[in-house]
């Protein structure tokens, strides 16, 4: 009867999972391959997806120039925190990295830099001992090689499963950044969504230049926590990158596709400034030598 009515049953096609994703910003269905090619930016509405640390580094560092450091560091469970080992294992499988920070060095638009990037897929990008140590080592490498440092931060804050040891990373990373400043080496801090807690309360807020991705949530405590604590309505867009730009906390908001070029511009400005300063110092020394010729014995 079905055949006589001209109906035909079509065999359902099995479409492999993971080929498409829905944009949280505009609801458009996007090919996962296309999203990966744009480093996680929606081609329809420019919504910025969260991306991993290695993808972040690939978006900034020239092809074939990245060399990773501190790969031998292993996360411990100093408190014997219940379920922590299982959390770490799940995060390794989910993120594809062994910890929430990847560090190393490479060339950014031809400029040698030290770099570290956090991965929100690994325990919310939280900063434990290994994360803090990798950020510190990236800074020390930059200091040793006399090159700029770039750090991209996305984090829920200090890692509670490591207790006071995680809080110590705030001081450790901040001290490393301070040594860079004393040496006159540029540090560019990039804030991605979200950047909160002990990370923004330490090295992430210490950049000579602080750049943020559009609509990134940046703050020590989340807006809901603050609103509940003080019992008051917060301003519209509170703690979003745009709000912080208006209030002087960040220097610029830069879409991810333009981030590499923006950082390169900043670093070239610092380099040109230092060259001018050295030339002026040389002229001053020469003028002093002419004004005060050596006296005969």
Image (cartoon, rainbow, N blue to C red):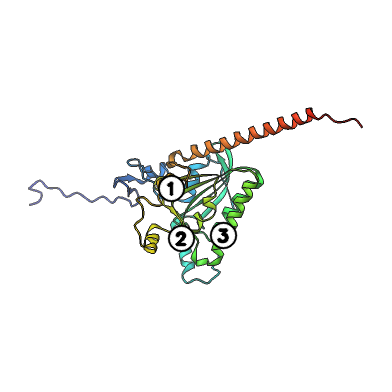
Q: Residue 79's spot in the image, x, y percent?
A: 54, 71
Density class for disc 2 (Cα within 10 Å; few <14, some 14-19, many ≥20) is: many
Q: Is residue 112 left or right of residue 222?
A: right
> Who comes first in sequence, dot 1 or dot 3?
3
Q: Residue 269's spot in the image, x, y percent?
A: 56, 35
Q: Is residue 257 left or right of residue 19?
A: right
Instruction: Read off the residue under disc 1.
Output: 244
> Who comes first in sequence, dot 2 or dot 3?
2
Q: Label 1 to label 3, Cα distance in Å?
A: 25 Å
Q: Label 2 to label 3, Cα distance in Å?
A: 16 Å
As displayed, is residue 295 above or below residue 179?
A: above
Q: Residue 148's spot in the image, x, y percent?
A: 59, 43
Q: Nearer the viewer, residue 137 or 64?
A: 137
Instruction: Read off the residue under disc 3.
Output: 169
Tell me which residue sits at (61%, 54%) in the image: 175
Instruction: Read off the residue under disc 2.
Output: 123
Q: Quadrant of residue 223?
A: bottom left
Q: Secondary structure at mark 2?
A: helix
Q: Residue 115's spot in the image, x, y percent?
A: 56, 47
């Amino acid at each position: 009867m079905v055949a006589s009515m001209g109906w035909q049953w079509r065999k359902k096609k099995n479409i492999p999972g993971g080929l498409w994703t829905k944009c949280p910003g505009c609801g458009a269905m996007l090919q996962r391959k296309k999203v990966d090619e744009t480093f996680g930016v929606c081609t329809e509405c420019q919504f910025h997806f969260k991306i991993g640390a290695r993808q972040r580094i690939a978006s900034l560092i020239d092809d074939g120039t990245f060399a990773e450091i501190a790969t031998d560091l292993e996360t411990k469970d100093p408190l014997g925190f219940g379920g922590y080992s299982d959390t770490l294992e799940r995060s390794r499988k989910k993120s594809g990295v062994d910890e929430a920070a990847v560090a190393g060095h490479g060339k950014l638009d031809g400029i040698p830099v030290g770099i570290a990037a956090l991965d929100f897929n690994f325990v919310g990008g939280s900063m434990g001992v290994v994360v803090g140590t990798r950020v510190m080592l990236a800074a020390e490498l930059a200091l040793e090689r006399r090159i700029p440092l770039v750090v991209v931060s996305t984090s829920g804050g200090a890692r509670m499963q490591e207790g006071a040891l995680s809080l110590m990373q705030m001081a450790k990373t901040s001290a490393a950044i301070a040594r860079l400043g004393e040496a006159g080496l540029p540090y560019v801090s990039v804030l991605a969504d979200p950047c909160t807690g002990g990370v923004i309360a330490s090295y992430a807020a210490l950049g000579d230049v602080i750049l943020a991705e559009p609509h990134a949530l940046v703050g020590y405590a989340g807006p809901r926590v603050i609103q509940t604590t003080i019992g008051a309505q917060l301003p519209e867009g509170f703690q979003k990158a745009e709000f912080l730009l208006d209030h002087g906390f960040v220097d610029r908001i830069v879409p991810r596709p333009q981030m590499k070029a923006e950082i390169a511009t900043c670093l070239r400005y610092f380099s040109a400034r230092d060259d001018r300063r050295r030339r002026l110092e040389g002229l001053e020394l020469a003028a002093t030598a002419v004004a005060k010729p050596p006296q005969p014995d």
